Image (cartoon, rainbow, N blue to C red):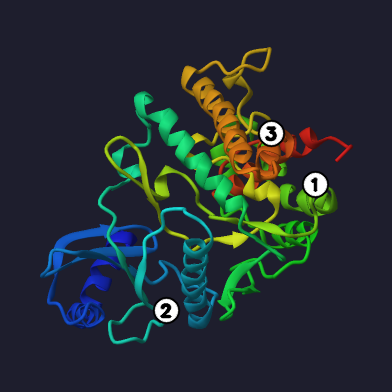
Amino acid sequence: MPGPIRSRAEKFLTSVDWAALQEFAASKQNGIACRLLPDIGLGYNHMVRIIEFADGSRWVARLKLPPLAKHNASDHALDTREICEFNTMSILRQRTSIPIPKINAFEPRSDCIVGAPFMLMDCLEGNVGIDLGMTIPPKNKQEFLRGLAKIHVQLSMVQLPKIGTIASMDPDGTCQQGPIPGLGGPFNTATEYFRAWAAQAKFSMSNDQLRAASGEHADEIVPSVSSFPESVGRLASRLSVRDHGPFPLCHGDFGHNNTVVDDDYQILGVIDWESAFAGPWEIFGDFPLSFSTVPPPMDVPWNYNKDGSPKDAELAQKFADQREYVAAVKREENRLGHVHHLSEALEDSRRQQLATTMRLFQNRKVGWYSRVIDNLGTDN
């Protein structure tokens, strides 16, 4: 029996009016005939098809899949998320040189003629980084790392007055901000954001499941996990060194999993901006997923020597990559004459580790969360 992801994909494939999608695409390309290529890309939230026109040009059709589980959000809220992504991509194409696919058409409504929200974009002739493997080849790593750093710095230069999504854009180019899905807002301060996160955060694992996953350390880990959101809320007013705006634009899932690269890992584009929002500098200063690690205070202690150095060579290399990434960010900030807010956030290890820990909490990573809080100390 197929699993829920495959079942959803099969049902979705038959529910979409693909002929209507082709007809719509042709109308946006001066009536040039087109066809859908047979390959189908499938992610957690989207199905992707390639549209090839008679003149040889290609577009990507990215269609929004329905939620796997019943969702508390209304259809309007889900449509709004697509609109915010469109606005984010539009403003980044206007204000930066970050390689982002051109949007040729956009339909956020589920009840459209195609039968699902969709976006038609220029096709980038490359590979999504994660499809080439979870490990970046050593010969390509430094160049790829520098490319990510340049994009991260450019994002740091797109700043908004509040913490929240880009709900709409005015004719003069200014933005109206909206709530972050599942969190609320927009927020005027980082303190408000951290308090809202603490109030909404859920570790999506039952107590029995958590105890089983924690093994012999369950008596330590279970209360450590359960108390983490409360601790974040209690310390909210002390977690950010820049409590008031402007705030940088966070991708929400930044790393090689959402970059399109060529065979040499030169970055051709950054994709999937649906989780983007302007956020606290500490959240923005999380390392790209390509170089992210479990914060040492949260990790199992036997992964480290007595002096705190990692025992595993692969883990040691990731920490070396992080140091090189910070250096690359600094070089780019200096080259552009930009403030060093991003590199400072990355170098503030205690707050940076907290941002990573908050992300891991939402991803159900088992670990010693209270130790990350303890590591913040009393002077923050």
Question: Which is more toward the observer, 167 or 303?
Answer: 167
Q: Which callout, 2 or 3, points at the residue further toward the start of the chain? A: 2
Q: Which residue is mark 2?
A: 108
In contact (CB < 8 Å): disc 2 and disc 3:
no
Q: Label 3 is placed on what type of residue?
A: Glu
Q: Residue furthest right?
A: 379
Q: Mark 2 to mark 3: distance in Å?
A: 39 Å
**Where is residue 175, by image quadrant?**
bottom right
From the top left corner, tell me how far across and down residue 342 is, in percent: 66, 43
Left or right, residue 71 beside residue 174: left
Compute the Cα span from label 3 to label 1.
Answer: 13 Å
Specify whether residue 215 is in view.
Answer: yes
| Mark linked to residue 367 | none
Is the residue 361 above or below the residue 177 in the image? above
Residue at position x 58%, y 37% from top?
329
Question: Mark 1 or mark 2: which comes first in sequence?
Answer: 2
Q: Earlier in the sequence, mark 3 or mark 1?
A: 1
Q: Return the residue at label 3.
A: 347
Q: Amino acid at mark 1?
A: Val
Residue 362 visible in the displayed image: no
In the structure shown, which secondary structural element does the residue marked by tag 2 occupy? loop
Name the quarter where the C terminus is drawn: top right
Q: Nearer the viewer, residue 342 or 93?
A: 93
Q: Position of residue 97 (x, y in %)?
A: 47, 54
User: Which quarter of the image is occupied by the N terminus?
Assistant: bottom left
Q: Residues within 10 Å of mark 1 (few under 14, many from 20)?
A: some
Foreground pick, 221 / 317: 317
x and y percentages locating residue 11 in the rendered image: 25, 72
User: Which residue occupies the extreme top position in the image?
Assistant: 306
Q: Which residue is mark 1?
A: 241
Element assignment for label 3: helix
Numbered disc 1: secondary structure: loop
